[in-house]
Amino acid sequence: MEGATGNSTTPRAVPPLLADVEVSNLPGFDVTPTPSPRHQDAATPTTPSARPQPSPKKASRPGGLPMDRVTRRSEVVLPSLESPFQAPGYRTMQPVSISLPASPTGFGAPAIPAGLGGGAGGDPDGLRRQAMANAAARGEPQPSPPAAQDKHGGSVRFAHQPDKVVFRSQPIPGGQPAPPGSARAGRAGSRVMSRDKRYDSFKTFSGKLERQLTHLARAPEVHDDEEDGEDDAITTSRSTSMPKVDRFFAALEGPELDQLKSSEELVLPSDKKWPFLLRFPVSAFGMSLGVSSQAILWKTIATSAPTTFLHVGTKVNLVLWCISVALMCAITAVYALKVAFFFEAVRREYYHPIRVNFFFAPWIACLFLAIGVPPSVATELPRWLWYALMAPVLVLELKIYGQWMSGGQRRLSKVANPSNHLSVVGNFVGALLGASMGLREGPVFFFSVGLAHYSVLFVTLYQRLPTNETLPKELHPVFFLFVAAPSVASMAWARITGEFGYGSRVAYFIAMFLYASLAVRINFFRGFRFSLAWWAYTFPMTGAAIASIRYSTEVDNTFTKALCVALSAVAVLTVTALFATTLVHAFVLRNLFPNDISIAITERKMKPIIELHESQGEDGSTKSNDIEAGSAQ
């Protein structure tokens, strides 16, 4: 090989790291510095090379390949900074980055006029002008440094001169080459990663359907690190396992078991608002109970003889009935979506010792709508409607009442609470509607079932057994449910027998006594947190007012008329105040649907790992509590 001085010397070895480099596969190696002009003999005709010329004073490094044995695939760029592999005779300078095409092959090999390229006699300015003309024709930035044309490779190689600007292409974004369809897959993967997975365990399919759809869309599976995978697995196990009845009593407190104890944690984030469907409880059907019962009250006032002096028309009944139907349809639609998308949350509500009673509420509300239908809408209802509405009630009663008698964890002595009246009052409401339609055996059957279980429930609640943990020490609006069953039972039996006889009067007097015992303690009904379940506690007051009007038709005097008017006024004012409170919480405070912590308790008493917002400083005390809880179990 001929060196820079024209003499034949021993070839210089290439460093081992660069000996076998396939530089054609390495992006960004598109520029090759050349030796300083003082090492190149312009008079010697040599082929332009991208490799540095060896120095005659240095011997080749042992173990390396000589320069003339290295296969030239493309030009190699040596680092511009100081490097142990930098050949002697090169000057290091800071390059200037100028926009160029992504690959130097974009310049091509244009036809170069004679005298412009190649050897020592070529004009560097001519090649520069030619390169600028070619770049301008393609609309690219025009290069300005001198360049030499490679006769072998046909690519442009820019000279590295100390007084010239060295052209270098802009860096290309790194990373592995994207497979076909990777853009779409990347977007799908980013959506999956940005989704909060902590709510998946409460979904209907627990995220399985979504993963199947993602697989069909050929989106890449998102693999989290090992620690996150373990956390997700533990979280899913805790949230999908249904807590037992004892666990609800141990983790929650309050008359409605809707308040978390200070020593407990949730499987869902407590510092973040949950999806709306998860926050929509089954107790929302209580609003339908309150409004539909008001429709019955105003229909009774408009059509009963003791209240004719009030001169109330049926238009109020029609307006309230239409509002009740619209409200019932809206609540049913929203809760149907919850059943469809968050069925696991619905299951937890069903296993909740208090919430399970509210599954009777939608059917009782439909019975109220059938009883309070305005005369202008329908005067007679088909009998099949009664069977269609009472069939779900019968199925629920077979399940609930069977658990009361089984002696297991859901025995009545353990789970008895005032909200259990909702599961009993449906029998009397159904008997009342059936007797109004002319049915005989069905209404008597449900009246008998309701009477038997109401007697047992009434005695159990009065005893306050030590095993019962849900009865609060202080009074609560839930206690008004004591009035509901005897009030409706008096009217149902009067409809069955055709007169407000002694049996109806016994039930009515029991209801009036319970009503009075709660009314004289009205000062104790303070300091409670508002909830939608309060709507379910208003229809007993409305039922007592309707029963008083029915009793006044049999015993017509001034006292009974004053009593029915007073109870009707109290019921209307209560519903109006509750309606205003609901509007304030919905549109002013915006906390009508808070996080439903009743369904988010853990299977056992321990700290959920998904609570990432907890500070690391609390780990020591929490671990000790978990160890004590585990040893106790």
Image (cartoon, rainbow, N blue to C red):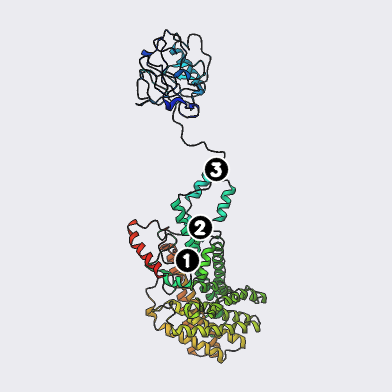
Three-letter code, disc 1: Ile
Contact between marks 1 and 3 (CB within 8 A): the answer is no
Q: Quadrant of residue 8?
A: top left
Measuring from the top left, give residue 534's x and y in whole percent: 46, 73
Three-letter code, disc 2: Asp
Q: Quadrant of the N terminus?
A: top left
Write down the residue under mark 1. Answer: 599
Residue 438: image tag: none
SS type, badge 2:
helix
SS type, badge 1:
helix
Nearer-N-terminus badge (2/3): 3
Q: Quadrant of the C terminus?
A: bottom left
For marks 2 and 3, give the CA distance. Answer: 24 Å
Three-letter code, disc 3: Arg
Residue 184: image tag: 3
Measuring from the top left, give residue 66's x and y in whole percent: 44, 19
Nearer-N-terminus badge (1/2): 2
Q: Which residue is painted at 49% across and 48% down in the image?
A: 223
In this rendering, is residue 12 above or below 421? Answer: above
Residue 200: image tag: 2
Task: Judge the density around disc 1: few (<14), some (14-19), many (≥20) Cα neighbours within 10 Å.
Answer: many
For marks 1 and 3, give the CA distance. Answer: 37 Å
The residue most toward the front is: 62
